[in-house]
Image (tube, helix red, strand yellow):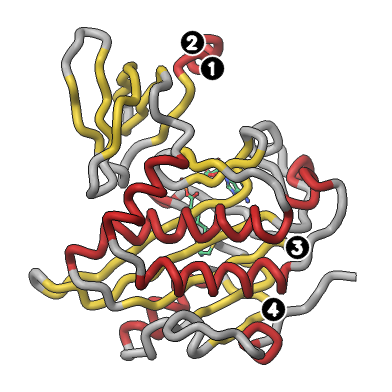
Amino acid sequence: MEDSLSPQKITDGLNTSLIGRRVICYPSLPSTQQTARKEAAQGALEGTVIIADEQTAGHGRLGRAWLSPEGSVSLSVVLYPDIAGLPYLIMIASLAVARSIEAVTGLDALLKWPNDVLVNGRKVAGILIESSMGGKAVDYAVMGIGININVDMSLFPEVAATATSLSAELHSSVSRLGVVRRLLLELDDLYKAPRQAIYGEWRSRLTTLGRQVCVVSGGDVQYGRAESVTADGSLMLRLDDGSLTMILAGDVSLRDAADENAAR
Ligand code: BT5
């Protein structure tokens, strides 16, 4: 029997200072991002969390679809960071997801730059940071997190080869409530942590560094070695001609160069 989520069950005894001060649960939404953005535009309390049991129009970057069937968790958090804090949101979200997966399931979670969380080499969670700017200040940011928990991703041909879920990796069902509660705790902890520490932990968990990768941006493909990441979250790619180029997270896909060559 699928464990149900409610604001009361999620927040009961949860000692967070900011994240989850208000939690709103929906059985189904087009996208929690959309609802959270609306809340933020109306000045919602910082740390407000919008959660849906399923999304009918979940999305990733560049308008890509994000599958969020029943058994997954989709949530968005309303935040009002300063502008210097924006690049850290992707790091905070990724680390919080990885730490929560490890704490609740014991599975190892690795990060693939810029925004994937992997278990045994497959994508188990995705993160989307959206923000609204008013001149040089941040009006609001919305941190979206989708985690495949008790879902059979092999039923979805478009991602069957690359996606997994916690239940598939663990061979048993996982408490969605447990994952959500732990996630809010980790987010609360990381949102207050020194930025240098966040950057250091994020970098150390990136499975991407040192690998030959292929960066796809629009129709453009670049091959190189993922050398490092900067504190603003950009990837430094050493191209085959020896030059170093900086790649911003927003508009690229990253693939293993070996897989890409095999597919050609
Ligand atoms: C992401 O985008 O990975 C960000 C996903 C963010 C989803 C959350 S859920 C809560 C909030 N509400 C939303 O509407 N969105 C956020 P991107 O890097 O663009 O990756 C998208 C790609 O991941 C797709 O093109 C598929 O290949 C793959 N994909 C789609 N659904 C998946 C799933 N459930 N599990 C694993 N891979 C998936």
Could you give the CA–CA distance between mark 3 and mark 1, rounded to whole angstroms?
30 Å
What amino acid is at disc 1? Asp
Left or right: 17 as drawn, with respect to 103: left
Query: First in sequence: mark 4 or mark 3?
Result: 4
What amino acid is at disc 3? Gly
Badge 1 density bin: few <14, some 14–19, many ≥20, Cα 10 Å: few
- Vertical order, 73 against 39 (above or below): above
What amino acid is at disc 4? Pro
Q: Quadrant of residue 44?
A: bottom left
Give the total of numbered labels.
Answer: 4
Could you give the CA–CA distance between mark 4 and mark 3, rounded to whole angstroms?
11 Å
Q: Secondary structure at mark 4?
A: strand
Whether residues under marks 1 and 4 lie with C-beta atoms below 8 angstroms apart, the answer is no
Q: Which mark is residue 144?
A: none
- Residue carrying label 1: 259
Residue at x-position 19% and y-position 11%: 242
Q: Which mark is residue 71?
A: 3
Left or right: 84 as drawn, with respect to 208: left
- Vertical order, 242 against 193 (above or below): above
Whether residues under marks 4 and 3 lie with C-beta atoms below 8 angstroms apart, the answer is no
Q: Quadrant of residue 206?
A: top left
- Residue carrying label 2: 261
Badge 2 density bin: few <14, some 14–19, many ≥20, Cα 10 Å: few
Residue at x-position 48% and y-position 10%: 261
